[in-house]
Image (cartoon, helix red, strand yellow):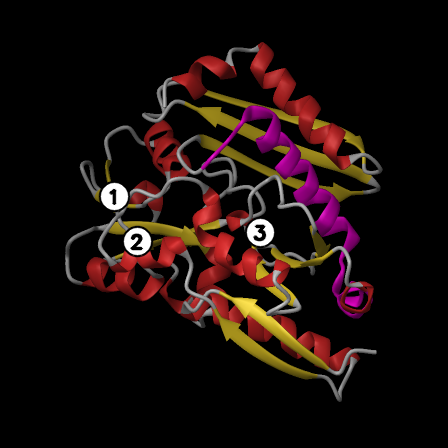
Amino acid sequence: MRRRVLVGSRGSALALAQANEVIKTLREYTPRLSCEVVAIKTGGDKRYESGESRLEGKSVFTKEIEDSLLNGEIQIAVHSMKDLTTDLPSGLTIAAVPRRADHRDALISRNNRKFEELPCGARVGTSSPRRRAQLLAARSDLEVADLHGNVDTRIRKLDGGSYDAMVLAAAGLVRLGLEKRITEFLSTKVMLPAIGQGALAIEARTDDPETLQLVSRLEDKSTHNAVEAERAFARKLGANCRTSVAAYAKVHEGKLVIEGMVSSGDGRMLLRGQLVADEADPQNVGKELAESLLNKGAQLMLEAE
């Protein structure tokens, strides 16, 4: 059994918190295991540091980490599932998906006003087309403005008065110990989450059976099936970081329940659908829901981005 594991991660406070969360759980199963986090600066991180806000493709936050995996420089990588591309590089696999944390988005406002209490014209910050579209679909009177940077940077901008409110993933705020800053957890009726939001992906090489066996104990099958359905939904739609696509799946009483959304960027055209099916084939479930929305005109919204 492997006794030392190098764990690749982005260097942000949230990414490191996630990596250390995984390490803590691994050590509960294998107390003598030696683990070390290797912080890897990705292309997306470098672009943010240079002030560039437009990022092309989700792989900007994973490529360098996955290259380190393939080169044998690290044994596992810990990602936010929502950062992971729907098609992995050859030779890599999602070795385990731990139990999902909170899947919802959270609102933080300067005056502790909930979403429905925000005044007309309130300036709400987000860098996500998915969030922008759903915010405007629910409240077209809001001003939704770009807000980039890590969590601390965004909160400073909010506190400084540049924004009245902002929307971030609830799981990230909790992992950073910032849950007291949350004004409101947004219902999925208002805000369906990003693909895989709240879940972690532990990635490893397919030709490293020792590591695959080591991390397999972290696997939560229901969570893995749920995010596989969401990822299949996104894959069928050709979703990327610029499209307004969302989905949330869960296992309930042996059935896989998935809800998905496609919208135009301004939120004026929005399609939602739900499917309940057998948990045994999550990828087909996600694909089937995507096909249902495509048959209802989702392609027009995707092309309007």
Residue 283 figure quarter: top right
Find disc 3 in the rendering and name its residue: 81
Q: Is residue 187 above or below residue 48?
A: above
Observer able to see residue 1: yes
Q: Residues within 10 Å of mark 1 (few under 14, many from 20)?
A: some
Instruction: Report how far apart the C-alphas of labels 1 and 3 lie in the structure.
Output: 23 Å
Q: Secondary structure at mark 2?
A: helix
Find disc 1 in the rendering and name its residue: 146
On the rendered structure, is 106 left or right of 36?
left
The residue at the point 39 percent across, 22 percent down is 264
User: Residue 141: percent from the left, percent from the top?
Assistant: 23, 30
Q: Earlier in the sequence, mark 1 or mark 2?
A: 2
- In the picture, the quarter occupied by the N terminus is bottom right
The residue at the point 49 percent across, 15 percent down is 299
Nearest to viewer (mark 1 / mark 2):
2
Q: Is residue 204 magenta?
A: no
Q: Is the Cβ of the residue at disc 1 closer than 8 Å to that at disc 3?
A: no
Q: Residues within 10 Å of mark 3 (few under 14, many from 20)?
A: many
Find disc 2 in the rendering and name its residue: 47
On the rendered structure, is 191 left or right of 201?
left
User: Residue 42: percent from the left, percent from the top?
Assistant: 42, 58
Which stretch did the figure color magenta?
A: 213-240
The amino acid marked with disc number 3 is Met
The amino acid marked with disc number 2 is Arg
Q: Secondary structure at mark 3?
A: helix
Nearest to viewer (mark 1 / mark 3):
3
Q: Is residue 221 magenta?
A: yes
The amino acid marked with disc number 1 is Asp
User: Residue 30: percent from the left, percent from the top?
Assistant: 78, 82
Q: Earlier in the sequence, mark 3 or mark 2?
A: 2
Instruction: Report how far apart the C-alphas of labels 1 and 2 lie in the structure.
Output: 16 Å
